[in-house]
């Protein structure tokens, strides 16, 4: 018995079908970034879950974590586990708590040369709501494909932090962003996304540590009494 083909309009209405002239909508797979301008440019209206995202940045402390903290806070408050694999700094617990992240749901893993492998195992386990990794080595095209396969179809926010030098290299990650700090915030260039290409970079007003107050990133778990100071510590 031959299958009855679906009408074209019905096929195009599916959330997992995307067209080159429009952004696909997968609201059930996305989590709001907390930045309305960014959500308007991300397919599905937020950070994708079940797919690998690459965030390319050359140095830390430009406000890059503030881009993700609202989503991480939402995931941890819903009871999800978060994992940071080889972050370049020790997370400042009071600052993360002040941003809404539940510290008891946060794991920091030092994997060294096995960071990519560790990331793949955590993604494949399906036990984490968010996995962020900063692998220094071992990330070639094959490793990227393995990470994408590991997270595909899972309700996990998976972000890989890499230098901007790899921007010209091909990647299976459906979403790739390049970040650059500036005096008034953060510039976000959407290098790759599903759907039509981004027309222009976004300029987000994100407070940068060290501009209006002290940067307090690390050491880990130091005590900060003032909530405002803690918020300023978030990189």
Image (spheres, rainbow, N blue to C red):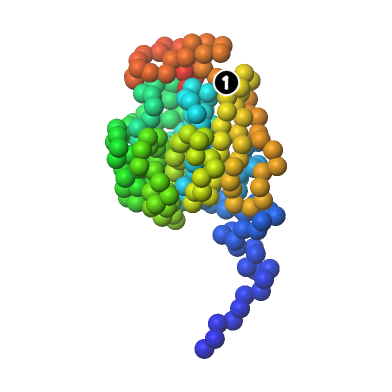
Residue 161 pos. (x, y %): 45, 36
Direction from residue 157 to residue 7 in the image, left or right: right
* Residue in view at x 62 percent, y 30 percent: 187
Whether residue 213 is visible, yes or no, is yes
Q: Is 31 or 171 nearer to us in this picture?
A: 171
Crowd around label 1: few <14 · some 14–19 · many ≥20 (10 Å): many
Q: Is 13 or 138 nearer to us in this picture?
A: 138
Above or below, 143 relative to 61: below
* Residue in view at x 35 percent, y 32 percent: 86
Direction from residue 192 to residue 77 in the image, left or right: left
Residue 170 pos. (x, y %): 51, 48
Q: How many labels does the image show?
A: 1
Write down the quadrant of residue 20 in the picture: bottom right
Above or below, 172 relative to 59: below
Direction from residue 31 to residue 151 in the image, left or right: left
* Residue in view at x 56 percent, y 13 percent: 211
Residue 165 pos. (x, y %): 50, 36
Direction from residue 183 to residue 108 in the image, left or right: left
Label 1: element kind: loop
Residue 200 pos. (x, y %): 69, 38
Write down the quadrant of residue 4 in the picture: bottom right
Whether residue 80 is visible, yes or no, is no
User: What residue would you read off at disc 1?
Assistant: 207
């Amino acid at each position: 018995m031959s299958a009855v083909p679906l009408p074209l309009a019905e096929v195009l209405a599916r959330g997992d079908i995307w067209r080159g002239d429009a952004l696909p909508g997968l609201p059930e797979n996305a989590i709001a970034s907390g930045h309305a301008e960014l959500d308007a440019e991300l397919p599905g209206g937020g950070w994708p879950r079940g797919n690998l995202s690459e965030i390319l940045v050359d140095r830390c402390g430009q406000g890059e974590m503030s881009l993700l903290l609202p989503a991480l806070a939402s995931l941890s408050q819903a009871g999800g586990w978060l994992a940071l694999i080889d972050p370049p700094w020790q997370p400042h617990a009071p600052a993360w708590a002040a941003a809404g992240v539940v510290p008891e749901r946060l794991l920091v893993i030092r994997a060294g040369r096995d960071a990519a492998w560790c990331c793949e195992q955590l993604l494949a386990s399906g036990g984490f709501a968010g996995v962020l990794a900063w692998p220094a080595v071992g990330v070639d095209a094959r490793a990227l494909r393995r990470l994408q396969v590991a997270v595909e179809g899972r309700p996990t926010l998976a972000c890989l932090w890499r230098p901007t030098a790899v921007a010209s290299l091909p990647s299976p990650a459906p979403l790739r962003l390049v970040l650059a700090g500036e005096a008034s915030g953060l510039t976000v260039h959407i290098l790759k996304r599903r759907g039509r290409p981004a027309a222009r970079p976004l300029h987000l007003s994100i407070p940068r540590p060290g501009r209006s107050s002290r940067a307090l990133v690390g050491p880990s778990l130091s005590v900060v009494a003032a909530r405002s100071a803690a918020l300023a510590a978030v990189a």
